[in-house]
């Protein structure tokens, strides 16, 4: 007990020094709504997702009243800021392509390898509709599909990512034969995912949830019948059964019906932990039945919620009492997505309230010294604001996202640590470019390899072709 108390005291007393070591002090003023919006904000009440607080606010300026605004009253990014972003994207793309000449030719992953670059160009095509970006994505896809190794099965770190991205790129190019071949190969991996004698974990980076994402990605990007619902259900059932079994082993069935571990630790965050798994299970395209969501997923989410630090941040694992990490992989920037999805599914205000607390932590401690990337960098943290803006339509979160984008516009000027794979999607420059491109069209943004877009319905022409 004494040791636990000293740990907690250490967290409280050393918090500011720890923050300075891991993050830069946020130099930006926070969003200041005007008029009626200001008075409602001052009351301390959380914004209503359907409320007009954000809509009434006058668009803020980048630095002061004399500067051009970041976005207009409808949340559309203003031409001045959009041009700055577009110019920077072109500059960073040139740097990235030059740097990739010395990248590992054998890394085909979405996380640090060539699939991540293909995914970036697919994103740029989605935002700009420039055919050259789709063609560039295809160039990388062809290279990737020749080098699959069969060792891993997930979207981010295994063969599922290259095959899923390949299927989508070929589909957009109306090459259905190649697209369907990629889907077939992806479904052949399912045997490894479901094997009862496998030591495959359930988390997102290396486990079943990461394979599940690949299936859901195809059904949202190509069409609802791209992957049979029966295949999705088998993976979902396997994840749920695994969580129930481990919870029983740990004697936590009542408190946390679905419990998961990775490398013998019960991780909390999005990459290796429970929040990423619960987030996937709550996706509408998963079609998990309401009873399972209510009886198994919801109490498990509440169990994780109660592990929150006083700051509003979350531990990296259930056994960790140190409030240090504010990354998508570990901490509030990943957990916030689970909370927002729980609010959508269960319609209970406590989830939105906790998500808003997470966003405040990210605003204060999210400009990371680790760099600008997606997994543990400023871009990944910035996506939490875009997602909260989608949910609430409160301009405060669009403003915060734009400010994190402004930070990324000065890429390399802050003295951040240089990542091991400096041009990759999840560690490096490609991730910052992805985030900046989503700022141009914030209403349609989505965190790569994690958030899903709206489910795409096939047109009659596609069905008849």
Image (cartoon, rainbow, N blue to C red):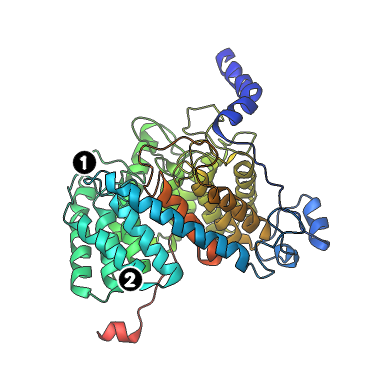
Provide the secondary structure element on which disc 2 rests.
loop
Q: Is residue 47 above or below residue 261?
A: below
Picture quadrant where residue 138 is located:
bottom left
**The disc label shown at residue 59, or none:** none
Position of residue 314 relative to residue 165, above or below, is: above
Is residue 454 in view?
no
Q: Secondary structure at mark 1?
A: loop
- Callout 1 environment at 10 Å: few (<14), some (14 to 19), or many (20+)? few
Q: Residue at x 33, y 45 (%)?
A: 112
| Residue occupying image coordinates x 63% and y 61% | 392
Q: Which residue is mark 1?
A: 198
Q: Nearer the viewer, residue 140 or 192?
A: 140
Residue at 25% across / 43% down in the picture? Answer: 104
Position of 96 with respect to 72 (left or right) is: left
Q: Quadrant of the C terminus?
A: bottom left
- Residue 246's x, y, as percent? 35, 37
Say above or below: 229 vs 323. Answer: below
Q: Nearer the viewer, mark 2 or mark 1?
A: 2
Q: What residue is disc 2 on?
A: 222
Residue 246, above or below 79: above
- Could you tell which of marks 2 and 1 lies nearer the N-terminus? 1
Residue 312 location (% of width, % of height): 62, 39
Give the x, y percent position of residue 185. 18, 60
- Between the C-alphas of marks 2 and 1, the distance is 30 Å
**Hey, which quadrant is residue 102 in on the image?**
top left
- Say few, some or many: other residues with alpha carbon within 10 Å of mark 2 (under 14 / 14 to 19 / 20 or more): many
Which quadrant of the structure image shows residue 4? Answer: top right
Which residue is farthest top?
2
- Residue 130 at least partly seen: yes
Answer with left or right where residue 355 lies relative to residue 88: right
Judged left or right of residue 384, residue 151 is left
């Amino acid at each position: 007990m004494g040791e636990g108390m000293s740990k907690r005291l250490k967290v409280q007393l050393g918090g500011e020094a720890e923050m300075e070591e891991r993050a830069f002090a946020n130099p930006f003023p926070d969003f200041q709504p005007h008029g009626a919006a200001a008075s409602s904000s001052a009351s301390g009440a959380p914004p209503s997702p359907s409320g007009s607080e954000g809509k009434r606010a006058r668009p803020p300026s980048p630095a002061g009243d004399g500067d051009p605004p970041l976005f207009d009253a409808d949340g559309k990014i203003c031409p001045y800021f959009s041009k700055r972003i577009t110019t920077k994207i072109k500059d960073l793309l040139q740097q990235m392509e030059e740097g990739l000449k010395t990248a590992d030719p054998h890394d085909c992953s979405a996380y640090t390898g060539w699939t991540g670059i293909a995914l970036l160009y697919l994103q740029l095509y989605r935002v700009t509709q420039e055919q050259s970006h789709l063609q560039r994505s295809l160039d990388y896809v062809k290279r990737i599909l020749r080098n699959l190794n069969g060792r891993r099965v997930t979207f981010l770190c295994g063969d599922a990512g290259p095959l899923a991205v390949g299927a989508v790129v070929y589909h957009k190019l109306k090459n259905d034969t190649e697209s369907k071949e990629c889907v077939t190969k992806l479904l052949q991996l399912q045997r490894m995912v479901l094997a009862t004698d496998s030591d495959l974990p359930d988390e997102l980076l290396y486990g079943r949830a990461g394979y599940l994402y690949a299936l859901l990605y195809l059904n949202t990007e190509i069409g609802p019948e791209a992957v049979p619902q029966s295949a999705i259900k088998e993976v979902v059932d396997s994840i749920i059964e695994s969580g129930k079994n481990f919870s029983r082993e740990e004697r936590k069935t009542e408190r946390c019906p679905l419990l998961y571990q990775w490398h013998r630790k019960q991780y909390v965050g999005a990459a290796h932990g429970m929040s990423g798994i619960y987030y996937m299970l709550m996706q509408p395209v998963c079609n998990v039945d309401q009873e399972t969501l209510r009886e198994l997923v919801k109490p498990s989410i509440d169990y994780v919620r109660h592990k929150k630090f006083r700051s509003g941040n979350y531990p990296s694992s259930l056994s960790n009492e140190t409030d240090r990490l504010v990354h998508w992989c570990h901490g509030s920037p990943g957990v916030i997505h689970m909370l927002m999805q729980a609010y959508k599914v269960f319609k209970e205000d406590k989830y939105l309230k906790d998500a808003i607390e997470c966003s405040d932590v990210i605003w204060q401690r999210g400009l990371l010294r680790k760099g600008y990337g997606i997994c543990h960098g400023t871009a990944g943290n910035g996506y939490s604001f875009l997602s909260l803006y989608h949910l609430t339509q409160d301009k405060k979160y669009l403003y915060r996202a734009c400010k994190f984008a402004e930070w990324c516009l000065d890429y390399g000027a802050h003295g951040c640590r240089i990542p091991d794979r400096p041009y990759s999607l999840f560690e490096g420059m490609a991730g910052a470019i992805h985030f900046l491109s989503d700022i141009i069209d914030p209403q349609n943004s989505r965190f790569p390899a994690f958030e899903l877009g709206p489910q795409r319905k096939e047109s009659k022409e596609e069905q008849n072709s």
